[in-house]
Amino acid sequence: AATLVAKILGFGREITLASSYGASSISDAFLVAMNIPAVIFTAIGTSLGTAFIPLFCEVRSKDGDDAAVKYTNNIFNAVVIICVVIAIIGAIFAPEVVKLFALGFKGETMEKAVYFTRIMLLGIPFLGISYIMMAFLQVKENFIIPGLMSVPYNTFIILSILLSVKTTPYILPYGALIGLLGQFLFQLPFAMKRGYRYIPYINFKDEYLKKMLWLVGPVLIGVAVTQINTIVDRTIASTLVEGSISALSYANKLNQFVMGMFIVSISSVVYPMLSKLSTENNKVEFNKSIVTATSTVILLVIPISVGAIILSKPIVKVLFQRGAFDDRAAYMTSVALVFYSIGMIGFGLRDILGKVFYSLQDTKTPMINGAIAMGLNIILNISFVKFTNMQLAGLALATSISALVTVALLFINLRIKIGPFGGRHVLSVFLKAVISALLMALVTYFAYKNIANIFGVGMVKEIITLGLSILAGALTYGICVIIFKVDEVNLIINTLRKKLKKG
């Protein structure tokens, strides 16, 4: 629920930007500038958070809570130093960095992107320590506050977008900068309630810091692979027609909304549990957790993926098409959405399976598979754009195919590493979910066509038509998976019943 609130606000940010600037040179420049610090430190921050949790459990188990807090501060202070250095270097070489992310930018678009980037890079230290606080809260079993972490960030960006329309676009990055600081300050008091207290302590010779750095390396490369894919996509998109980066970004944000609402929520809760079970060598519960997590993701994501393909045009129209976001921008975004949706299940399972390997303190396997997927993505990107007429659609399709290949490789490697873990059950759930989703697609498509004919045109009528069509599809899918007797459906229903009873 917390993640849902945060993601709705984040999506509101995209809608605000789309309605204010559409798919234009300003939105292209701002999105690239926002992506640069995200790429630079999301890779580092995610890898630090990933390595932090199992080692925190180890320190606390061996030496107690005080040692765990000391370990946290050592990581915290080391991250601050590293981030300040990265921010300074990035600000100095901002033009070169922007060219790396958007090769086709020239003139005023390039000038804006460089300015935006310099300001936003100052927020990298805040971004870094936010990830440490997030990992600390998660290992303390507080998942609500990390779920809401992006609320201050998105709020300040929305305010800066609205203000920029009435003044100047050059104030856009300041909202993002203040938002990055807000993310950290929002989490800090809750971390202190869970036992965190700041200590000005740093020891680069600490055995756990060394062990963490040893684990971080492969994780960093594995996470960076995804970010490099984003860079490649946007770099090639910058050479296509104006607005291609924006259309690609808006479609990707729809995908990320689903990932954040369901996948990140599941993996955030499952990862500390898997790390604990791995430390205890509880293989039965460990394997059971893998099957439950992957099956739940499949059940949730497959129908959303199929639904997004069937209803891509009305979804984009209802969510984005207003103000400067015209028919052309809507068409470009809907095309990208269709091809991103093909790989949605790959994006979801990749995150879950990566966490499984990390909980086993195996960081190399996801790194190697990620590198293979990156190479495939680059080859497919170039092939689709250069040798076909797919253009923007080709970039999204290449990303989807590479994600699906990565998941297939991760499942194979997991089977090799831990032996049979319930793969047949996962495959059974997948097949049942696909059949149910295809039946849902037929009902959704005909429901939309018939309801649209009844209600006619107009934004309010379009929203009602879309909502009723989604409801018809969801009911169809739900009935199908219940008929197929999928075990995880009962788990979801029972969990909801318990929550309702508590309420």
Image (spheres, rainbow, N blue to C red):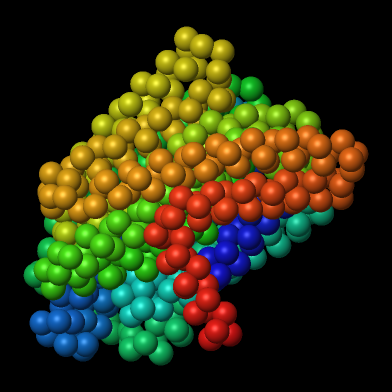
Towards the viewer: 471 or 321: 471
The outermost residue toward the front is: 483
Q: Say which residue appears at 52% left-offset and 72% top-offset.
A: 496
Residue 273 to residue 313: above or below:
below
Towards the viewer: 490 or 295: 490
**Which percent across, then down, holds residue 107?**
62, 29
Q: Is residue 153 left or right of residue 162?
A: left
**Which percent across, then down, holds residue 186?**
51, 77
Residue 381: name its quadrant. top left
Residue 52 to residue 222: above or below:
below
Q: Say which residue appears at 53% left-offset and 86% top-offset.
A: 502
Residue 42 to residue 149: above or below:
above
Residue 388 to residue 73: above or below:
above
Q: Is residue 459 left or right of residue 100?
A: right
The outermost residue toward the top is: 387
Is residue 180 at least partly visible in the picture? Answer: yes
Q: Quadrant of the N terminus?
A: bottom right
Is residue 24 at least partly visible in the picture? Answer: no
Q: Quadrant of the C terminus?
A: bottom right
Q: Say which residue appears at 30% left-offset and 56% top-offset.
A: 291
**Which percent across, then down, holds residue 241?**
64, 22
**Which percent across, then down, holds residue 327?**
78, 31
Towards the viewer: 64 or 472: 472
Residue 76: name its quadrant. bottom left
Q: Is residue 497 left or right of residue 126?
A: right
Towards the viewer: 377 or 156: 377
Q: Say which residue appears at 47% left-offset and 40% top-offset.
A: 434
